[in-house]
Structure formats: C-alpha cells, structure tokens
Image (cartoon, rainbow, N blue to C red):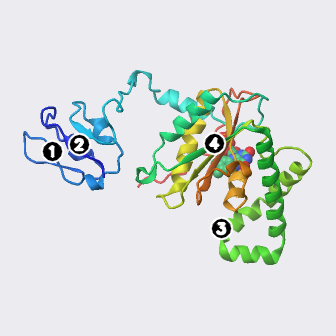
Amino acid sequence: MPNIAIDPARCKHCNACVEDCPAEVFTFEKKGSAPGVVRADHCIVCGHCVALCMHGAIEHSDFPLGTVLPINREILPGPDALMELLRARRSARVFQKKPVPRDLLEKIIEAARLAPTAHNDQGTQYIVVQDSAELKQIVDMTGAFLGQTAKALRNPVKRKLFGLLDPNGVKSAWGMVGSFESVAQAVLDGNDMVLRGAPCVLFFHADPAITKPDQSAQLAVQNATLMCEALGLASFYTGFVVAACACGVRFPSLAGMPPGHRIYGGMAIGYPKFGYNQWPDRKPAQTQWV
Ligand SMILES: Cc1cc2nc3c(=O)[nH]c(=O)nc-3n(C[C@H](O)[C@H](O)[C@H](O)COP(=O)(O)O)c2cc1C
C-alpha cells in the first residue's frame, strides 16, 4: 500500500483530488481544510492526484519529488495534426535492409509504456528480436504453424471438433485457410511472407493473471505503432506470429520470457522502402447515436 499524505501547508483546499481520484482515496473534511486520506489501500497508483495538484501538496510514496514532470502543452499536436498522423500510419510490408537503431526502439517502447492499462497494472513487457537467425526461426516456425493449421482445418472431422471448442475462432480461421496455405508455401519457397524481411520484431507479453492483459497490450501496440510513424519508421501487426504463439509455438528468441507469460501482441518494424503520400478512405463509421 502506498504512503499518501497531504501537506496542509501547501494544500489550497480546492478538493480537486477528492473529486478526481478514481479510487476515492481522499475525502472532503470541511471547508477551508485539507482533504483526508481515507483509503490509501484502494490506490491504483495511477498518479492522477500528483498530476493534478499544482501546489505539490500531495506526497505519494510511488511518485517521489522529481518524478512528476510538467507537460509541455505547446508541443502537443492539435486535432488536425493528430488526425493527419492517424491517416499517415499504414501497415508497410516492404522494408529497407537497414537495422533500426536501439535509441529509436527505446522511444517506441517508451510510447508503448505510456498506454493505459486495465487497473493500471502496467504489466505489459517487451522483447525485441533483431538477430537475423532468430528472425528466420520466427518466420520458419510461423510458416510451419500456418501449414499445419491449414491442414487440420481442411480435415472436416478436425474442423468440426475445433469448432465445438471455439466456433468463432474456427469460422474466422476457415475464412483465411487459403491465405495460411499461401504464406506457408511461400516460406517453404524461401519467401518471407511472415515478417516481410523486417529487421526487427517487437513482442508484447504479460502474465495472463493480470487484469485484461490482452486489451492493455493492444493499446500499447497502437501507441508503439504511432511512434514508429512519427519516427519515420514503418510497422505492421504480426498477427500470424502472435497466433502461432497463442497456439503454443515457442520461438527460441522468447525463451527469456518469465514463466507463464503469454504473447499478446507483435509488431514488425523497419525503415520503409516506400512512402505513402495519399490516404485511401476507410468504410464510413457505422454509429448509433442514442
Ligand atoms: C490483429 C491484427 C493482425 C494483423 N496481422 C497481420 C499479419 O499477420 N500480416 C500482415 O501483413 N498484416 C497484418 N495486419 C495488418 C492489417 O492487414 C492492416 O492493418 C489492414 O490491412 C489495414 O491496413 P493499414 O494498417 O495499412 O491501414 C494485422 C492487423 C491487425 C489489427
């Protein structure tokens, strides 16, 4: 449990912390006095209180002095700049044969780390694979996995059995069986249709016992994707690779993952060979306003 206190000498009695804390750690005492700290044991360490209090009145053991820094609002993108970034981001699949420098990968992970996480668990962890032999193993093992999966799906008895366990999963996999087969065959022919020659894969993994590990990891992936775009790098979501992991394929490069952890996301990253200067529109949003 964190130690939380309010310095009465600094507190201006605005009670914003009382209103804003999602865990209701603080309570209104009386007009003109500092709020009380009543439920520190409920604190999810989100940092809202220390981010909010401009008077530095909140002392929180997880956010010691010097760890809460001001936001430079002058450099925040406006809605137009943000929308343009969202339009500019594309899944690129043709990469230059050039490694991604470590400082850029660290920036990408830093962006991922700042994504929201369920219950503020912050449990998503990362593995960066850049070694060419390890990358080749990921490609080969994923290709083999896709080939075996397609073969099993083509067997009506197996398909029916799998369908009893996971009807939606089998329906969607069956719709992609042709693509599984062509990717598997391409890999056998020495054509990397899995990572598309990307020089780097970033894996997102977590302990499945944390709150909503999958959803939290996907948000981290999206942050990382946008940072790639901002850095002039390209990426795509390695869905086949993640599916292989989910079905028990263990790449040697992931041997250092803590026991029990699962892969929830993966991104191929590299310098793009081509730039996209135009954006094709998406389907219109199907929205109900109630
Ligand atoms: C969950 C998920 C899995 C994906 N898996 C793959 C993949 O295995 N290989 C690939 O080339 N692209 C993959 N993609 C990228 C999509 O094909 C791509 O996002 C979509 O075609 C839209 O294109 P855009 O990202 O360029 O806008 C995946 C995307 C998502 C969200």
Residue 273, label in figure: none
Asked whether residue 285 appears in the rendered view, the answer is no
**Callout 2: CB less than 8 Å from ligand 1:** no
Residue 81 in the image: state x and y as whole percent.
51, 27
Q: Which residue is mark 2?
A: 17
- Cα–Cα gap, marks 3 and 4: 25 Å
- In primary-sequence order, the first of circles 4 and 1 is 1
- In primary-sequence order, the first of circles 3 and 1 is 1
The nearer-to-camera label among 4 and 1 is 1
Q: Is residue 73 left or right of residue 93?
A: left
**Callout 3: CB less than 8 Å from ligand 1:** no
- Report the residue that reaches farthest toward the right: 189
Q: Which residue is mark 1?
A: 35
Q: Helix, strand or loop at disc 2?
A: helix
Query: Residue, x 67% and y 71% (percent of image)?
Result: 167
- Cα–Cα gap, marks 3 and 1: 51 Å
Residue 282, label in figure: 4
The nearer-to-camera label among 3 and 1 is 1
Q: Helix, strand or loop at disc 1?
A: loop
User: Looking at the image, how many numbered discs can be counted on the residues?
Assistant: 4
Classify residue 235 by image quadrant.
top right
Q: Is residue 39 above or below residue 102?
A: below
Q: Is residue 75 left or right of residue 64?
A: right
Q: Which residue is mark 3?
A: 168
**Callout 4: CB less than 8 Å from ligand 1:** yes
- Cα–Cα gap, marks 4 and 1: 49 Å
Q: Is residue 47 left or right of residue 238?
A: left
Residue 93 in the image: state x and y as whole percent.
75, 38
Q: Tell me the amino acid under the disc marked 3.
A: Asn
